[in-house]
Image (cartoon, rainbow, N blue to C red):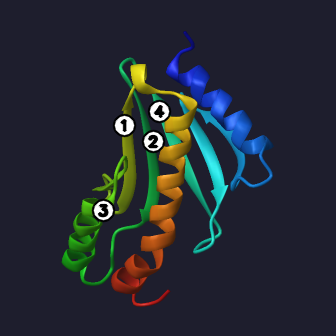
Amino acid sequence: MPSAAETLWHAIDRWIADEESSVEYAEQVEGRIAVRMRQETRDASTVWWSPGQRSLTAELYVIPVPENDRESVYRLALDRNRSTYRVHYALARDGGIVLRARIPNHDVDLALLDSVLGELYEQVELSFRPFVRMAFGHG
């Protein structure tokens, strides 16, 4: 049985080879795998996949620390969590907003990785502009 990291690399190869996919490239950086994908609402997003001993974690940076109305921005992120399935909004260490997912290694397969990547993409498309408007007064 392939490891979670091996299955992820297989999925990445498929995403890059698929002309319909938004994935542009991937690289390994300090034990994590960065997957860059084109977006409609912003130029691109990078999903950082971190293979661990028990799980595979994905993280996508959505916006930096809000300059305006921080409480409302954080409330919107929490509210958006009610409609997500495999991913959730969380605070980055610096106070920015990220999307995260954690998959137990024994559950990692190509279909699930496709679903998680798709949900990350979709959440950025739905939330990026509202977050930017609230947090920075433009977008």
Rendered position, 84 above or below 130: above
- Apparent side of residue 80 relative to residue 20 in the rendered image (left or right): left
Residue drawn at x 50%, y 45% is 115
- Apparent side of residue 39 relative to residue 84 in the rendered image (left or right): right
- Three-letter residue code for mark 3: Ser
Distance from Cα at disc 3 to Cα at disc 2: 18 Å
Distance from Cα at disc 3 to Cα at disc 4: 24 Å
Are the two marked residues, 2 and 1, in contact with CB atoms closer than 8 angstroms? Answer: yes
- Three-letter residue code for mark 2: Ala
Residue occupied by mark 3 = 83
Residue drawn at x 47%, y 32% is 50
- Residue 6 position within the rendered picture, expressed as x and y whole percent measured from the top left: 60, 21
First in residue order: circle 4 vs circle 2: 4
Q: Secondary structure at mark 2?
A: strand
Instruction: Note whether residue 96 is visible.
Output: yes
Are the two marked residues, 4 and 2, in contact with CB atoms closer than 8 angstroms? Answer: yes
Residue drawn at x 36%, y 37% is 102
Residue found at the far bottom of this picture: 137
So how many labels did they put on this image? 4
Distance from Cα at disc 3 to Cα at disc 1: 17 Å
Which mark, residue 58? 2
